[in-house]
């Protein structure tokens, strides 16, 4: 398994139709919660005061992460930064 730290900043256009906005956000929530239940989306934290999050994904490969991110309903409205993670030599856990 590979761990990735992912920052997602969301910027939904203000002129997006309200029904489309609500439907997209609902699909995003369902998709992300399903991935969390599977253990793939291992951690999800909101960044205070921003429409942003920091997440940890536990996936088989960068290719799997790529597919997950591209399938996010809010993906077209996101700026995403990804950092691959590895164990630290001083970590006790």
Image (spheres, rainbow, N blue to C red):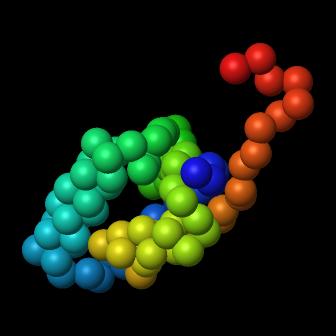
Which residue reaches farthest left?
19
Q: Is residue 80 left or right of residue 31?
A: right
81 over 32 or under it: above or below: below
Which residue reaches farthest top?
92
Quarter occupied by residue 89: top right
Residue found 29% across the figure and 82% down from its top: 15
93 over 32 or under it: above or below: above
**Camera-side residue of 2 and 4:** 2
The reply to whether residue 2 is in sight is: yes
- Screen quadrant of the C terminus: top right
Q: Is residue 13 left or right of residue 19?
A: right
Quarter occupied by residue 19: bottom left
- Whole-percent x, y for residue 78 in the image: 49, 72
Residue found 43% across the figure and 48% down from its top: 41
53 over 78 or under it: above or below: above
Residue found 52% across the figure and 56% down from its top: 59
The reply to whether residue 77 is in sight is: no
- Whole-percent x, y for residue 5 in the image: 63, 51
**Camera-side residue of 63 and 83:** 63
Residue found 55% across the figure and 74% down from its top: 63
- Whole-percent x, y for residue 54 in the image: 55, 47
Q: Is residue 25 left or right of residue 81?
A: left
């Amino acid at each position: 398994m590979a761990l990735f730290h992912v920052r997602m900043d969301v910027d939904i256009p203000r002129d997006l139709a309200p029904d489309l906005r609500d439907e997209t956000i609902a699909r995003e929530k369902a998709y992300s919660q399903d991935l969390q239940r599977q253990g793939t989306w291992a951690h999800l934290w909101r960044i205070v005061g921003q429409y942003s999050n920091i997440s940890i994904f536990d996936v088989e490969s960068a290719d799997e992460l790529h597919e997950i991110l591209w399938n996010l309903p809010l993906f077209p409205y996101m700026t995403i930064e990804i950092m691959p993670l590895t164990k630290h030599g001083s970590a006790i856990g």
